């Protein structure tokens, strides 16, 4: 459910207060501490990229302090924490931003973003400026760079003898874990499944116990989270070329010198580029690794999935929040 106007106004006021606090704090200290909260593990490509690139590049004036596996803030609560000055940075999703600003849901729609290059082109295009501006003005959050998460695939406990997925009709009745926000739940339904909202850190146990039939994530996540230990197949739907954003406190950013701000921007892009290259390489390498672990991996009828998912979005209330012509502009930046 998108956030009410009153709640968003409260957050904007909190962000303004955070600016004053951060300015004072930053001026009062030699260096600042940049706490980053993510549900991702320490070994996830995005976490490694931020630790190996972002941290060292801001070390002259800031201490980068990552918190993994949602140990500091629960998945989905990070943006509000940054807005209220309780956190400086997160690896945010368009789905989380869509809970504040419904128009962000266009970037969560299945089969819209085509690949990693398309993500970068969209993020850097003028069409994305209003989205960055809104996050800054209403949440006090700067979206510094896009992080490639990867092509999301359907990962199931059932063996292919029990369940072979060719079209969305084959997912009818399948209890598919999706992250908790409305945009994610809609995607699960558009795939034909029954979506169950659940935090990322609970997924392995739910698959192991059978309380869900499956989950959807890119292959690197299936490996990093060891979901392959408790599932039997991967259906290569590639239903969402998923991305996150390096979300950074505007209050802290505004308290920095121009040189420090430039360093933060450069560090964010260095991490995004490094992480993207690593994640793409992993996606190429991991099919054979997962087959070696005994999983069946196969392509469904992609045309059937694409048609069903795109039709569902175009007919949805989500699409009513999309600015006129924006989908065409996004498509024009792709291949
Ligand atoms: C997930 O919960 O499945 C998801 O992939 C959603 C993403 O937006 C992102 O939060 C991701 O989890 C975490 O970074 C863990 O990889």
Image: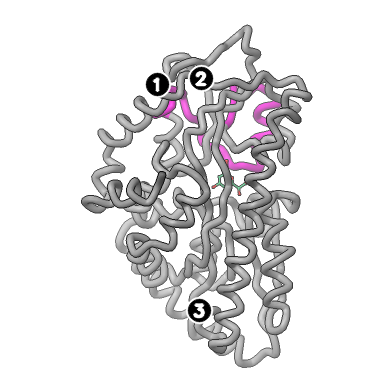
Q: Residue at x 52, y 49 (%)?
A: 116
Res. 304 mark: 1
Image location of residue 184, percent across then percent down: 45, 39
> Is residue 244 shown above or below 255?
above
Q: Residue at x 61, y 79 (%)?
A: 263
Q: Residue at x 44, y 56 (%)?
A: 121
Task: Point out the tag, 1 or 3, that comes first from the N-terminus.
Answer: 3
> Is residue 234 shown above or below 277?
above
Q: Is residue 224 left or right of residue 262?
A: right
User: In terms of image quarters, where does ligand 1 lie?
Assistant: top right
Give yes or no for residue 56 being in the magenta stretch. Answer: no
> Is residue 213 shown above or below 35?
above
Closer to the camera in the image, 208 or 332? 332
Report the mark closest to the observer, 1 or 3. 1
Res. 300 mark: 2
Q: Residue 48 is drawn in which quadrant?
A: bottom right
Q: Is residue 134 left or right of residue 146?
A: left
Image location of residue 322, percent across then percent down: 27, 49
- Viewer can see residue 309: yes
Per the rendered image, the range of residues in magenta is: 189-215
Specify the farthest residue to the front. 335
Image location of residue 59, percent across then percent down: 72, 78
Q: Residue 287 is drawn in which quadrant?
A: top right
- Badge 3 is on which residue? 251
Q: Secondary structure at mark 3?
A: helix
Q: Secondary structure at mark 2?
A: loop
């Amino acid at each position: 459910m998108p956030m009410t106007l009153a709640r968003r106004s409260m957050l904007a006021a909190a962000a303004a207060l955070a600016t004053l606090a951060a300015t004072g704090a930053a001026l009062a200290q030699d260096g600042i501490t940049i706490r980053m909260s993510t549900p991702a593990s320490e070994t996830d490509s995005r976490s490694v990229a931020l630790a190996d690139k972002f941290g060292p590049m801001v070390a002259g004036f800031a201490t980068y302090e990552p918190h993994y596996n949602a140990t500091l803030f629960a998945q989905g609560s990070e943006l509000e924490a940054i807005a209220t000055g309780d956190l400086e940075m997160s690896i945010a999703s368009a789905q989380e931003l869509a809970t504040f600003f419904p128009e962000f849901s266009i970037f969560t729609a299945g089969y819209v973003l085509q690949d990693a290059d398309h993500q970068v082109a969209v993020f850097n295009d003028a069409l994305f400026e209003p989205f960055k501006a809104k996050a800054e003005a209403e949440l006090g959050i700067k979206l510094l760079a896009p992080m490639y998460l990867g092509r999301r695939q359907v990962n199931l406990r059932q063996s292919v003898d029990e369940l072979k997925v060719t079209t969305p009709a084959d997912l009818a009745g399948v209890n598919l874990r999706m992250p908790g926000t409305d945009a994610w739940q809609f995607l699960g339904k558009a795939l034909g499944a029954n979506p169950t909202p659940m935090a990322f850190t609970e997924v392995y146990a739910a698959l192991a116990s059978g309380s869900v039939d499956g989950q959807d994530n890119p292959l690197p996540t299936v490996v990093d989270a060891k979901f392959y230990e408790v599932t039997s197949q991967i259906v290569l739907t590639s239903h969402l070329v998923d991305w996150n954003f390096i979300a950074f406190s505007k209050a802290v950013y505004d308290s920095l010198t121009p040189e420090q701000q430039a360093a933060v921007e450069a560090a964010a892009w260095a991490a995004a580029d490094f992480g993207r290259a690593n994640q793409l390489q992993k996606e190429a390498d991991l099919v054979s690794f997962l087959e070696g672990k005994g999983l069946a991996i196969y392509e469904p009828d992609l045309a059937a999935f694409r048609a069903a998912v795109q039709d569902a979005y175009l007919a949805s209330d989500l699409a009513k929040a999309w600015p006129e012509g924006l989908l065409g502009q996004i498509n024009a930046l792709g291949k």
